[in-house]
Amino acid sequence: MDALLSFAAALVALRLGGQLARRRRLAWAGALFSFAAATAAMAWGSAHGWDARSFRVYYLAGALLSAPLLGVGSLLLWGRRWAAPMALVYVGLAIGVALVMPVHGTFSTTVPRAQDHVDALPRVIAIAASSLGTLAVLVVATATLRGRPRQGLLIVGAVIAAGIASALTQTAVAAAAAAFAVAAVLLYLGVAGSPRGASRAYQATTRSAND
């Protein structure tokens, strides 16, 4: 069940991320693709057991990229164009960190804890980048709340759902996967402003996962 729900969440995030990419909301799309990669790694780990390769994918997508890309999307929405080149530099850094960081310890079918497998520096980078990304989302949502209250609240809701998902990965993988799917739908609704379109995408992806 954990693997199935994680895979379904990956399909939801991938489907909605593709729709945002077509709308040229590239930072938001990148955040959803990160959700998709993280939940796909969770599905693989639940079904086949974790190893260093799947953990690197999970750490890159879930710890290093998802929250910072959410923050970049918010800054671009606010008209801060300088965020785009900074994001490209950071994405390159994050990929490099994920590729070269030493991964140690033994793995099982449970979601690995970063402190058990990664040294301090990659964890510090992930914590700092995620904190700044979340802060950017909250600042922009607060600054634009009067003009775009529904959009801002949905995006903040997506960040909260993603945080809940991350907290649940150690104890309830199925619930974490569901929270990631909720985060993807909320983000899509906040950015695209099309509840009907997001609902259709969510329903279609869920049906395909269950077939």
Image (tube, rainbow, N blue to C red):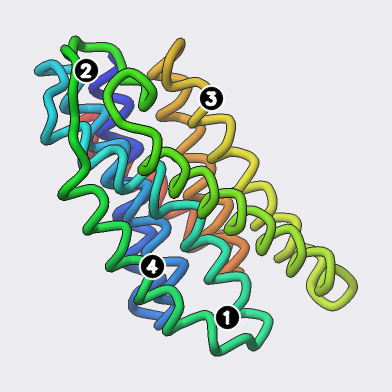
Q: Residue at x 25, y 33 (%)?
A: 7
User: Measured from the top left, where is residue 147 in percent x and y?
Assistant: 85, 78
The amino acid beneath tag 3 is: Ala
What residue is disc 1 on?
76
Can residue 6 be seen in the rendering of this structure? yes
Could you say which disc has been placed on residue 167 in the image?
3
What residue is disc 2 on?
46
Q: Nearer the viewer, residue 33 or 203?
A: 33
The amino acid beneath tag 2 is: Ser
User: Measured from the top left, where is residue 176 in percent x and y?
Assistant: 45, 25
Could you say which disc has been placed on residue 90 in the image?
4
Q: Residue at x 24, y 58 (%)?
A: 95
Residue mark closest to the camera, 2 vs 1: 1
- Closer to the N terminus: mark 1 or mark 3? 1
Label 1: few (<14), some (14–19) or many (≥20) C-alpha neighbours in 10 Å:
some
Label 1: which secondary element: helix
The amino acid beneath tag 1 is: Leu
In what quadrant of the picture does the C terminus appear?
top left
Relative side of 125 to 157, left or right: left
- Closer to the N terminus: mark 2 or mark 3? 2
The amino acid beneath tag 4 is: Tyr
Up the image or down, 132 lies above or below 172; here it is below
Label 4: few (<14), some (14–19) or many (≥20) C-alpha neighbours in 10 Å:
some
Q: Nearer the viewer, residue 94 or 3?
A: 94
